[in-house]
Image (cartoon, grey):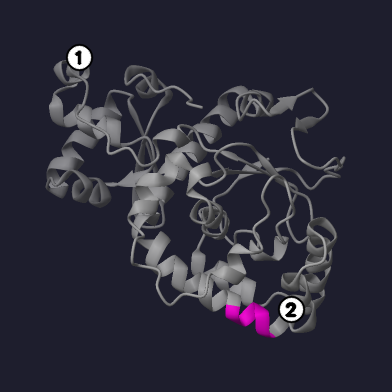
């Protein structure tokens, strides 16, 4: 079992919210920021591929993430390299699920041309709609990954799967996922990829087609609060730790470096480093090195202290 984040998945699934805001109330704060910013991008062909009500969305739109934390440029490169045979396979499935459509016909007649146009449109859409909020979304998704990874290390896979979503149940020898289609997928030693999502907000999704590893996409913890602006540290926590350290503790539900934290809280790197050291020595933060950077994140003790709970 492993965890990863897919920027491409978030990009593609965000189109469902863009197409029908009435079904995506929790994303309205983000949708409002897009007014007047998407002109000139030919999004209609991409939106037409997004299945609703459990209908099929072509898998080639969302190539597997190249790294655990995802990289949209690598994802777009992978999309542009999709073999025509893969496109034709997926669009045949799309046509059989959606019925005869001009959309499927265009893709089957000219898969290379349609792919090039789609990739360019998605790249432009990313730059205008998702890139400005990606640091926020990435931090939100990283917080979920950090939580699940700790849970996996401390309590094992059954505990991780037990609280992903009400539509996911663990039965000892299998994972059952409520889905619009029925299938039994033997893992056959391939393992399971867990992928939190902000734009898969109502129900889990599964991916069982190559080149994907068997994958379960689920709403990230607290997805209903993803666009909340937050607030000041609770008074009791501030009285216990001091206002600045309480603020730092609340900010570190996802891994951040000293520099990133200092920028977020508008403090000096030296001041942030001092507070981080105190909180780490008190057992409230864990630190890990990634290359030349040290990342800090709350421990389970700190989660309990700030009242962190898995949210629906």
Cα gap from disc 2 to disc 1, whole angstroms: 61 Å
Q: Confirm whether the magenta stretch covers residue 5.
A: no
Left or right of 209 in this view: 117: left
Q: Dot 1: few (<14), some (14–19), or many (≥20) neighbours within 10 Å? A: few
Q: Which residues are magenta?
A: 113-117
Q: Residue at x 69, y 45 (%)?
A: 53
Position above or below: 257 against 107? above
Instruction: Identify which residue, 6 or 172, lies in the foreground.
Output: 6
Q: Name the residue that disc number 1 marks.
A: 236
- In the structure shown, which secondary structural element does the residue marked by tag 1 occupy? helix
Position above or below: 5 against 158? below
Q: Residue 2 at what x, y percent from top left? A: 64, 43
For discs 2 and 1, the disc positioned in front in the rendered view: 2
Disc tally is 2
The reply to whether the C-beta atoms of the residues labelled 2 and 1 are less than 8 Å apart is no
Q: Residue 40 at what x, y percent from top left? A: 43, 77
Q: Give residue 154's quadrant in the image.
A: top right
Left or right of 273 in this view: 136: right
Q: Confirm whether the magenta stretch covers residue 114.
A: yes
Q: Name the residue that disc number 2 marks.
A: 106
Q: Dot 2: few (<14), some (14–19), or many (≥20) neighbours within 10 Å? A: few
Marker disc for residue 302: none
Residue 164 showing in the rendered view = yes
Q: Main secondary structure of the magenta part?
A: helix
Q: Residue 298 at what x, y percent from top left? A: 36, 31
């Amino acid at each position: 079992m492993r965890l990863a984040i897919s920027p491409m998945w978030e990009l593609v699934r965000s189109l469902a919210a863009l197409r029908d805001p009435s079904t995506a109330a929790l994303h309205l704060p983000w949708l409002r920021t897009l007014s007047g910013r998407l002109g000139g991008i030919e999004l209609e062909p991409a939106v037409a591929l997004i299945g609703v009500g459990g209908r099929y969305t072509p898998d080639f739109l969302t190539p597997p993430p190249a790294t655990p934390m995802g990289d949209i440029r690598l994802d777009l490169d992978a999309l542009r390299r999709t073999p025509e045979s893969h496109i034709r396979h997926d669009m045949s499935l799309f046509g059989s699920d959606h019925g005869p459509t001009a959309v499927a016909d265009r893709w089957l007649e000219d898969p290379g041309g349609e792919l090039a146009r789609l990739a360019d449109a998605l790249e432009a859409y990313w730059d205008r709609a998702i890139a400005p909020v990606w640091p926020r979304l990435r931090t939100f998704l990283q917080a979920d990954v950090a939580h699940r990874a700790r849970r996996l290390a401390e309590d094992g896979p059954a505990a991780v799967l037990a609280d992903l979503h009400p539509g996911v149940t663990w039965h000892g020898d299998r994972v059952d996922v409520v889905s619009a289609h029925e299938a039994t997928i033997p893992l056959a030693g391939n393992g399971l990829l867990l992928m939190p999502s902000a734009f898969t907000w109502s129900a889990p999704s599964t991916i069982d087609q190559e080149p994907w590893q068997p994958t379960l996409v689920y709403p990230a913890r607290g997805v209903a609060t993803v666009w909340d602006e937050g607030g000041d540290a609770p008074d009791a926590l501030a009285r216990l730790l001091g206002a600045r350290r309480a603020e730092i503790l609340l900010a570190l539900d996802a891994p951040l470096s000293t520099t990133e934290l200092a920028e977020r809280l508008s403090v000096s790197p030296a001041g942030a480093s001092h507070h981080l050291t105190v909180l780490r020595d008190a057992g409230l933060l864990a630190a890990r090195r990634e290359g030349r950077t040290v990342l800090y994140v709350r421990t389970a003790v700190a989660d309990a202290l700030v009242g962190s709970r898995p949210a629906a």
